[in-house]
Amino acid sequence: MGPAEKKSLNRLWMVFLAVIVLAGPLLKGGETYFTAAGLRLLIICAGMFFFSRKIKPGKFSLSIPIGNRILLALLLVLGASLITTHYFFPTIYWYTIFLGCFLLFYLALNLMAGEKGGRLLQGLFWILLASGLIQSGLGIGEYFFQGRMRAAGSFFNPAYYAGYLASLISFPLAAAAFDLWPGISGWKKWALRLGMALAAVIIFCGVLASASRVIIFLALPLGLILVVRFRYLGAAVLVLAASALIFIPNPARDRIKNINSDPYAWERVTIWKSSLKMVRHHPAGVGLGMYQYYYHRYMYPMGNVKIGRYGQEAWQSHNEILNFAAESSVLAPLLGWDSWD
């Protein structure tokens, strides 16, 4: 393969990563089914194209992660739910979703391990940063110009929106706190780190605009990073930021302050209790995607909520670990947690 062809192929993979990242939020938007089907077909085609080119006569070169056996064991455990489920087709549908996620993971891993892996990794950083800034801009605009009390960006749910931004803020924060580009020196480096700090602030404001309680869980790792990296200065910034959140009016503060007046605020606690009962009665799991069909058997009545609410059922446990345990056995969260770590 010549230099020109390699450069063209590298650009093609950059476009692929950009489409996957930037279109990801639409999965929780108004075009979920069409977008999901399109992205899955794109991942399958990209995987077939990439891995077919890796096949050589008598040899197949593949980069695998350190915890590869644990990941494969997780895939087997998830596949076992095809036996325990009472509704095969919804379960096989969700299993194919996990297969697509595994394919994307191994595809991205092998792309980053190639000759141009460093450039692709750097390009992915900027794509993720751009996605975070775009979504933050949408949310902040909704709050200030559309009068929405809880911004959601391109998501239909403010909680999903806040969780998405909470996962992306780590990229500009890491670039601001650590020297990720040692080849740059002088004022350019400081300008870049200042720009990354500003990007982190913008994304944080996007989370604030969502008025989601995700802000509580986001503050813990952010505070830990600041204290470990900058020690006393980081602690001072953390105290200053916490004081601002407490005393300066903002959407997140108002929602947390009025938490006891919200009749549904503690509903997730009852859902978690119901999930634990489901896990206890079905240690092998009820089957992928089956949580919503079993929840009504284990739901606790909510005494502080009007009678019409008693018929409400949860589609999922609002906790990834509990959801894995309930649908795919108690082994699934253990394998998943170890592989994520």
Image: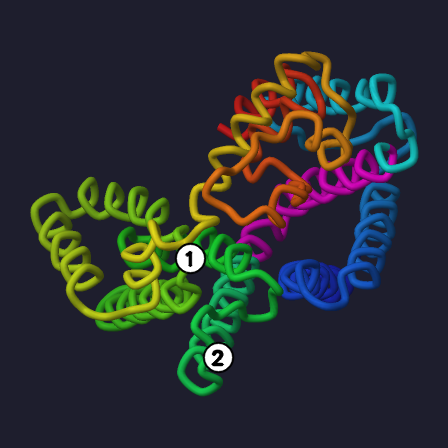
- Of mark 2 and mark 1, the one earlier in the sequence is 2
User: Which amino acid is tagged 1?
Assistant: Ser
* Residue 66 appears in the picture as rendered: no
> What residue appears at the point 84 percent right and 32 percent down from the top-left corner?
91
Q: Secondary structure at mark 1?
A: loop
Viewed as shown, does residue 46 lie left or right of 20? right
Please tell me the numbered disc located at residue 142: 2
Check disc 2: other Cα within 10 Å, few if <14, some if 14-19, many if 20+: some
Residue 118 within the segment the image draws in magenta: yes
* Residue 256 appears in the picture as rendered: yes
* Residue behind mark 1: 212
Q: Quadrant of residue 184?
A: bottom left
Q: Quadrant of residue 329?
A: top right
In this view, 172 is above or below 301? below
Residue 30 within the segment the image draws in magenta: no
Viewed as shown, does residue 6 lie left or right of 245? right
> What residue appears at the point 62 percent right and 64 percent down from the top-left corner?
156
Q: Whole-Å distance between the Cαs marked 2 and 1? A: 15 Å
Whole-percent x and y of residue 101?
A: 72, 41
> What residue appears at the point 43 percent right and 54 percent down from the top-left corner?
166
User: Which amino acid is tagged 2?
Assistant: Glu
**238 or 275: which is nearer to us?**
275
Q: Which residue is situated farthest in the bottom direction here? A: 145
In this view, 293 is above or below 83? below
Q: Which residues are magenta?
A: 92-121
Check disc 1: other Cα within 10 Å, few if <14, some if 14-19, many if 20+: many
In this view, 127 is above or below 90? below
**100 or 323: which is nearer to us?**
323
Whole-percent x and y of residue 297?
A: 70, 26
**1 or 128: which is nearer to us?**
128
> What residue appears at the point 59 percent right and 23 percent down from the top-left corner?
333
Whole-percent x and y of residue 193?
A: 29, 64
